[in-house]
Amino acid sequence: MALPVSLPMLAITSLLNPQNAERINRIIKSLEVEFGLDDVQATPDPHITYQLAGVRKLSSLKKVLREVAHTTKPFVAHTTGLGLFPGPNPVIYIPVLRSDALNQLHYRITQATKPLCLRTDKFSGPDCWLPHISLALHDTTPELLGPVLQYLNTQTFNLKLTINNIAILRQEGELFVQEKCFFFEGHKHEPAPTLFESSQS
């Protein structure tokens, strides 16, 4: 089936909590000041991407992601170190450690969206997916790598992330902006503890 040329690719993500987002944005801003790298700022909200998807009906995508968020409990994820995707414009990022909770969320998202996706990116599959937080991309060069990594090497990147939402980002001009954010509600639907359980806690 031929795909419409205008079919947009949407990013299915989790936005970082405000404290961590502020820290990441400070790092990104410092890379602009020190090295002139600012293309990553086209997405103002730091995030973890689960999938890039082209869908015909945005309303259907919102419905299935709302259902996933409705039954998911917030959980903690961790980052460590720095990573690099090589190429003419290398991507510098902070790796997010895969955990059972993060893998399960990624699986639920990809399974829920599979019937709706007319196309997706090859790195969304469970074997290839590498969750990360981008610090620099598109306007980097191999020549800049050494100085940038030396600059970043003076900092630590061990973050504790609260994963509590699924957000759709869409392209608007040169920016990627929030289309919709669904906060996790699984913890709201747990059964109340019995009298015995309450007395044991």
Image: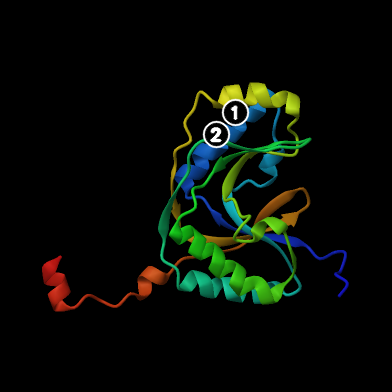
**SS class, disc 1:** helix
Q: Position of residue 55 (x, y in %)?
A: 73, 70
Amino acid marked by disc 1: Ser
Q: Is residue 171 above or below residue 109?
A: above
Amino acid marked by disc 2: Arg
Q: Position of residue 129 (x, y in %)?
A: 61, 55
Q: Badge 2: how crowded within 10 Å, few (<14), some, or many (20+)?
A: few
77 left or right, relative to 65: left
| Residue lying at the far front of the rendered structure | 127
The mark total stands at 2
58 left or right, relative to 27: right
Instruction: State the quadrant of the C terminus.
Output: bottom left
**SS class, disc 2:** helix
Q: Give me the residue at 75% from left, 61% from top.
A: 9
Q: Is residue 32 above or below residue 40?
A: above
Q: Are marks 2 and 1 in contact (CB under 8 Å)?
A: yes
Q: Position of residue 95 (x, y in %)?
A: 54, 43
Q: Is residue 114 visible?
A: yes
Front residue of 44/157: it is: 157
Q: Is residue 70 above or below residue 106?
A: below
Front residue of 148/98: it is: 98
Residue at mark 2: 26
Q: Give me the residue at 49% from left, 27% from top.
A: 155
Residue at mark 1: 30
